[in-house]
Image (cartoon, helix red, strand yellow):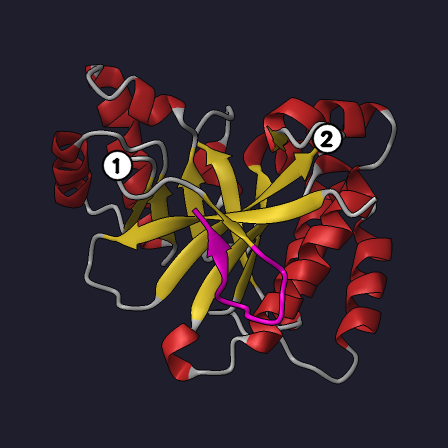
Amino acid sequence: EDRMKLAWQSIASLEGDTRNHFDLLVRMTDETGREWTASEFLPAAQKFNLMRSIDRWVVASALDLIARRTRPADAATLFVKISEDTVRDAEAFVVWLRELLGSRKLKRDEIVFEAQELVLQNHIRKARTLTRELVELGAGFAIEHFGVGPSSAQMLDYIPAQFLKFHASFTQSFGDRATIARLSELVEAAKQHKMKTIVSHVEDANVMARLWQMGVNYISGYHVQEPEVVLLSDDPLAVKH
């Protein structure tokens, strides 16, 4: 019923990278005009097996935004989440994406697909095939909610990711010594694999400074910027604050 829309949240570089990076988030408006966040309506979508369709709508909309951002000044990297249902359905998703793209080649610095670590771990064979196929198509890949699995560091040997997005619990428990030690260990593992790191839910300037000292590459959160809604109109840069 044309009730879904995209929101974006800025991902800020701690290294002075001038390219824009954005997390794409999905929103839905109900009959009363109230806007629902993904966490509020996606559980129902999962229950009714709608996640594959929602993933494809988000991916197609993201590619449309990229295609319409033709000026060099508008260049950005968009991070697009895919669900467990899409990881399970990896072969069909890749076939659909190839058909959608046609002769077009993706660029790794334009779109980065991401899936949660525990989802990838639970479907490791399909996850490995899917990420390889996406990278071959030219896209980037990120492991999100990273660091909470029993074999997080070992996962880096199996999934050809370019980015790691740490689980929010690392920021929420940042005062805990064990948390900081674990984060530092995983940041070093990422460096060894030449993967960039992103820490989310950063709400404090002191935390941001500590993350910079640890060698984290990017951060996001309300301290950086609140999400904004992308209007899929003729103006690809139009946003509603």
The quadrant of the image that shows the N terminus is top right
Q: Residue furthest front?
A: 32
The amino acid type, in three-letter code, at marker 2 is: Asp
Q: Nearer the viewer, residue 222 or 33?
A: 33
Reading the chain from its start, which is encountered first: label 1 or label 2? 2
Disc 1 designates what residue? 223
Q: Is residue 181 above or below residue 52?
A: above
State how many labels appear: 2
Q: Report whether residue 66 is seen.
A: yes
Q: Is residue 234 magenta?
A: yes
The amino acid type, in three-letter code, at marker 1 is: His
Disc 1 and disc 2: Cα gap in Å?
29 Å
Element carrying mark 1: loop
Q: Is residue 135 left or right of residue 178?
A: right
The percent position of residue 26, horizontal first and vertical second, equals 62, 42
Q: Residues within 10 Å of mark 2 (few under 14, many from 20)?
A: few
Give me the disc on residue 30. 2
**Highlighted range, magenta:** 231-241
The chief SS type of the magenta part is: loop
Element carrying mark 2: loop
